[in-house]
Amino acid sequence: MGAISDVPGIRVGHREKSDDGWLSGVTVVLPPPGTVGSVDVQGGGPATHETDALAPTTLVSTVDAVVLTGGSAFGLASASGVQRWCEENGRGFAVPGGVVPIVPAAAIFDLGRGGDFSARPTPDMGYAATVAAAAQEDGHDVGRGNVGAGTGALLGRTYKGGTGTASVTLDNGVVVGALAVVNALGIPFETTPAPSMLAPLPDAPPMNTTLVVVATNAVLDVAECKRTAAASHAGIARALNPSHTLADGDTVFCLSTQAVALGRSDEAARQVSLITLQSAAADVVRLAILDGVASAEAVSTPAGDYGVYGMQ
């Protein structure tokens, strides 16, 4: 299946806690300096931070880190710890007197799943996840399953979700990778659930989200990253049924490390190269989501017995 770290320079760090009432964590994707990025939000219930700064019409085009976190909107505080690490290491948008790190973030809803509603990721956890990412070697193994932001993830409000990753290398040397945190209302198309599986569990709020980071070594500008993030949502729709609901905060970030030029000899070549890349991105997102589900461990919680769907 590969991993998002197959894109040269992309590193991933996790921090989580699953005791003393905790069942949550943080995942940080740390790209190389100069990485261009954007985002596309298509879920009806997002919890995000600094996503407006990634629009093609805004001042800044580069991204210093992406944070995926548990804790709903409370967990977005973990991004400040990531910003602190970036500032300490001179990563950020240069301003008089220093740098301002560009660290967008998105959160899943996992509040109270470990028993303590107040147990949610902190700035220190974000900082630690960034330290872990920075310490990784190029092409490192990426943790899968109930790690990082996927620690407290659920699927269809009944089964364990988790963190998954996948990658593909195209004939032109372009690598496309994806990291997904699956906390979705929907469930994989490979299964045939009873309708009751989508019914709310006792005391379970209808809060769900699939978070994705797509990364590529292809040279893309911010508008092309935005378009690639939007196209990648097709991978969520192919993997999960339903998707992009009012109760999901489905969000896709796209990062371009600017290493491999695409064919741009004329407009037709440009379109073909972008369509090929974006089609691959959607496929890789689908694989990363299914990997996150397949890698999740069965656990038992007060809401019921969670297991993992068997997939062929």
Image (cartoon, rainbow, N blue to C red):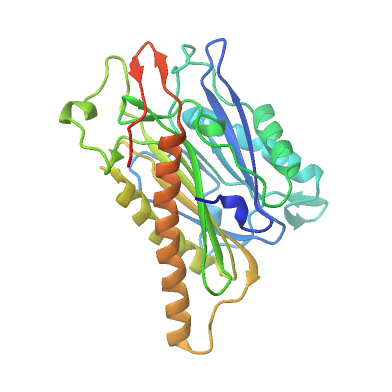
Residue nearest the observer in this picture, 293 or 225: 293
The residue located at (36%, 29%) in the rendering is: 308
Figure quadrant of residue 211? top left
The residue under the point 47% across, 25% down is 152
Across and down, in percent, residue 256 comes to 59, 62
Q: Residue furthest left?
A: 195
| Residue 140 visible in the snapshot | yes
Q: Residue at x 80, y 46 (%)?
A: 89
Residue 125: quadrant of the picture: top right
Q: Quadrant of the C terminus?
A: top left
- In depth, the one of 154 and 174 nearer the eye is 174
Front residue of this view, candidates 299 and 152 = 299
Q: Is residue 75 left or right of residue 33?
A: left
Residue 245 is situated, as x and y percent measured from the top left of the image, at: 28, 42
| Residue at the extreme right | 97
Placement of 167 over or under 164, stated as above or below: below
Q: Choose top left, top right, bottom left or bottom right for residue 105.
A: top right
| Identity of the residue drawn at 36% across and 21% down | 306
Q: Position of residue 289 (x, y in %)?
A: 41, 44
**Residue 234 versus residue 272 in the image, above or below:** above
- In the displayed structure, 183 sits above or below 219; it is above
Using the rendered image of the protein, determine whether residue 244 is visible from the camera's viewpoint.
no
Horizontal side of residue 40 vs 258, given as left or right = left
On the image, the x and y values in percent for residue 14 come to 62, 34
